[in-house]
Amino acid sequence: MRTGLIFATEEAERQPGVLAATLPFGGMTLIEYQARLLIGAGVTQLLVAVARVTPTLAAAINRIGRRGASVDLVRSAEEAVARAHPLGTILALADGLVTTDAVVAAMALEPADTLLVTPDDDAATAVERVDAGHCWAGVATLSVDRLHDVVRLPREYDFQSTLLRVATQAGAGHVLLPARAIRAGHGVERDAATLEVRSRDVLASLAEARSGWIDRYCFTPLTRLILPLFVRRRVPAVGVLGAGAAIALGGLAAIPWWGAGPAAVVMVVAMVLLSAGSLLGWLRGEDAQARIGEQGIAALGVLGVLGIAGVHASSVGSGTAAVLGLAGMAATLIGGRVPGPVAPWAASPATALVLLAPFALGGVTTIGLALIALHGAVSLTMAIETLRRRV
């Protein structure tokens, strides 16, 4: 059993009375983002180490509790020991830490008593020195015994610092902070302005985590432009998804009236909004809404291609376009369900609609549909061949 431990005792810089853990981050508070990372790493119980409880912190704790994990406030190591599972593992995050899900998930798999460290010359990611050449980088996987070690020491010691000290004295192993985590915004911040910059870094890394070529070269660049705007204005993910769905329906309805080209462009815009809404939901721990966004993109891709193929076939009086659309979508959907790794270039409903759009605009819709069918067939063939080799 994994227990998450978040420290929320330090005040924000230049904001007396405001806890750093309650500073805005990605449309929520920093501690909510930290809790989301821990829950995503398999934590079922959260302990929040506090010295005092502000109204903003109390509200954030209530919101965290509605996400499926139990949350307990602790004011000392004794209270933490009383609430932590005696055979569990503690996954601790430093006060004011900003990091990514990849870092936390990787540390959750490390054995007990392992510290994430960084070279001492990297002040932005350093929390506290652990030896002559390294500083703690804010994430630790610890055994419950380390909490017992803290209990045996005087209570006036700083909880976070003391826990790090006893873990170091117990011979905790070290894992070096990856360079990509630093580029993604990993670090400890207690300044609201600097935290906003790190929030943008995390948002950018989140958008770039998608590996498909359609995400990397189409959705990600556009999402990186609009997502910070939604976050800054605190637009809910459901609002972005709703706007995307409305535009998608409009694009589908416009196929017979506007023509395949303009309708395809409208639907691609809808896909960008659905992608942004999905990422926004993921960032805020609204996994159900994030999944709805991804499913909406896939459904729009299928319906858009089939709708354009059907209308075009009807307008030219030939079934070729309809057959190509059906064949392409069938191969794409079947290929996507073949077990195994998915190649970045593999066909998907989203890639099909994006590929079709320029051909539809150019008045050669049938050629675009033929390309989709070929892309789907090649992807399906390669997926089956990869599966055969694995078996």
Image: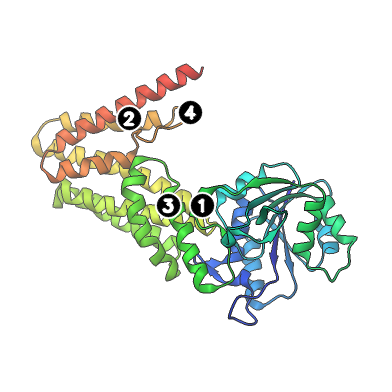
Give the residue displayed 48% in from the left and 68% down from the top.
196
User: Which numbered disc flags the more N-terminal residue, 2 or 4?
Assistant: 2
Where does residue 347 sit, x and y in percent of width and height?
33, 34
Q: Nearer the viewer, mark 3 or mark 2?
A: 3
Q: Residues within 10 Å of mark 2 (few under 14, many from 20)?
A: some
How far is disc 2 from disc 4 in space, using C-alphas? 18 Å
Element carrying mark 4: loop
Where does residue 350 sit, x and y in percent of width and height?
32, 42
User: Which numbered disc flags the more N-terminal residue, 4 or 3?
Assistant: 3
How far is disc 1 from disc 3 in space, using C-alphas? 18 Å
Give the residue displayed 82% in from the left and 66% down from the top.
76
Q: What amino acid type is highlighted by mark number 3?
A: Ala
- Considering depth in this image, is 331 or 280 the residue closer to the camera? 280
Element carrying mark 2: helix
Q: What amino acid type is highlighted by mark number 1?
A: Ala
Mark 1 highlights which residue?
Answer: 288
